[in-house]
Amino acid sequence: MAGRLIVISNRIPMGESISGGLVVALHDALGCSGGIWIGAHPDPGDGDDSLEELGTSPYQRLAFRLTEEEQNNYYLGYANSVLWPLCHRRGDLVEMRSEYETSYRAVNARIARIVSRIAEPEDLIWVHDYHFLPLATEMRARGLRNRIGFFLHIPFPALGDLSVLSQPERFADDLAHYDLVGLQTRSDVARCLEMYRADPRAEFMPDGSIKFLDRFTSVRSFPIGIDTKGFAADAAQEAVNPFGREEPGSYIIGVDRLDYSKGLPNRFRAFARYLETRPEGVRPCLVQIAPPTRQQVRAYQDITRELEEIAGHVNGAFAELDWTPIRYIHRAVPRAELARLYRKARACLVTSYADGMNLVAKEYVAAQDPENPGVLLLSRFAGAAEDMTEALQINPYDVEEVSAAIAAAFDMPLAERKRRHAACLEIVKKTDVTIWSTDFLRVLMRCKPFAVPEYLGMRSIPDPAL
Ligand code: GDG
């Protein structure tokens, strides 16, 4: 790569410890090319254009600070109370306020100013997620001609749902300022292309790219994955015992940020239904790790309360002196413990109503002992279900079906568990996070440089690949 890689994401690793799939992948990609990672500092600031250095080796980490007002209106507001519910098919939870969108645009304009100051013509710019949809529009307006890629980690919205936005036509326009738009699945790509097909400003080119007004963009799927080897190694570490003396017999695991898109209430209901219908069967625990997230947003306070109530009811109805059916942990657990928890669990429940990919599904598979693996119960609405066809796919809206799938997981013979696990593991390896980032960057590097209208009298940068 001739230039540096500049990554922009809302979250940025703060300390020296590099863990978590995405962080590891971007860390590796940046480590190879030498580059810059820009993200939001968790503490508030006065919202100026300055960047704070968090570390320089093996690449630079730079943080901008949001004001409290920006944190409320841009982050909790437009990003997480408009775009997040919109993309997760929860239009009923969208909270429209004009100050949210104003702040969202203003923060994107500020980050564009900052990036324009530091980017050199040969640098590749990789923007992450729904916090920064209009960032390329703002960067192009400031004259940046670099190749700019975008990756959306969450589901691409359905065409009809975009009408929730005050100016839905800006969605297609903003995305078309990127040279490459990466999405998680083929279904996401289909929805994105449907949006462009319905837009008279877009034209499809013979090479599959889209001409939008005077610009070209490509849309492709790049299913994200995990650091498979690293995760499997953590899981096999026998020294780590997350339960101490309180180890349950057989248990099912669930690991999710406490988000309404993850279908947790129905998961608890389905588990209760299993206990009800199988009084003679295995008495497993459901170990649910659900660290809090976005707690200032009303919808997240509601789901937290609802889940506590359901867990209370289920435990009240079924618990015995020596057995608690649901162990609900409303905080984060260390990564090595998590890996170990996955390995020992007889099944993993993923019940998302909508999910870009769902890394938990891949982590669970990577963590298993191939000689005695557990069973993955995977919502058919998670992006991971598109390729992991040998998981036990479930409809999370159907409590009876999920409860029957729990029973099937406990009854499943070893040979079938091994066969299903081997097939899923193959997919997890094929979509390893390093493959994901290198594939994306390779395609981005091959994109034609940003087309500059002739009448502006500018020259586009030469393409070394041509
Ligand atoms: C978004 C998209 C897409 C969870 N609790 C703990 C913990 N975690 C880790 C898991 C996993 C990650 O958080 C969650 O990733 P998911 O993919 O399941 O879901 P989102 O957070 O919604 O992520 C999603 C992803 O972006 C990547 O593109 O797959 O669809 O929504 O890695 O292990 N980690 C630790 N303790 C916890 O308590 N250490």
Image (spheres, rainbow, N blue to C red):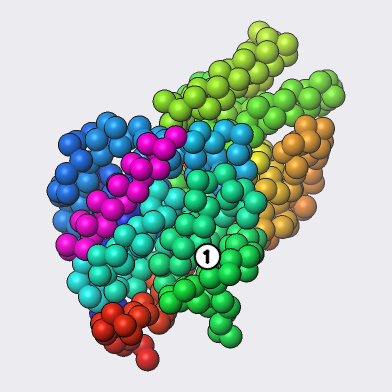
Which segment did they paint magenta?
97-118
Overall secondary structure of the magenta section = helix
Residue at x 43%, y 31% (from the top left corner): 294
262 lies above or below 316: below
The spot of residue 323 in percent (x, y) is 65, 15
* Residue located farthest toward the front when viewing the structure as drawn: 455
The spot of residue 183 in percent (x, y) is 53, 61
The answer to whether residue 291 is left or right of residue 361 is left
The spot of residue 311 in percent (x, y) is 63, 18
* Viewer-side residue, 201 vs 189: 201
The spot of residue 460 in percent (x, y) is 29, 83
Residue at x 44%, y 46% (from the top left corner): 234
Query: Is residue 104 magenta-colored?
Result: yes
Residue at x 57%, y 29% (from the top left corner): 288
Residue annotated with mark 1: 222
* Residue located farthest toward the bottom when viewing the structure as drawn: 466
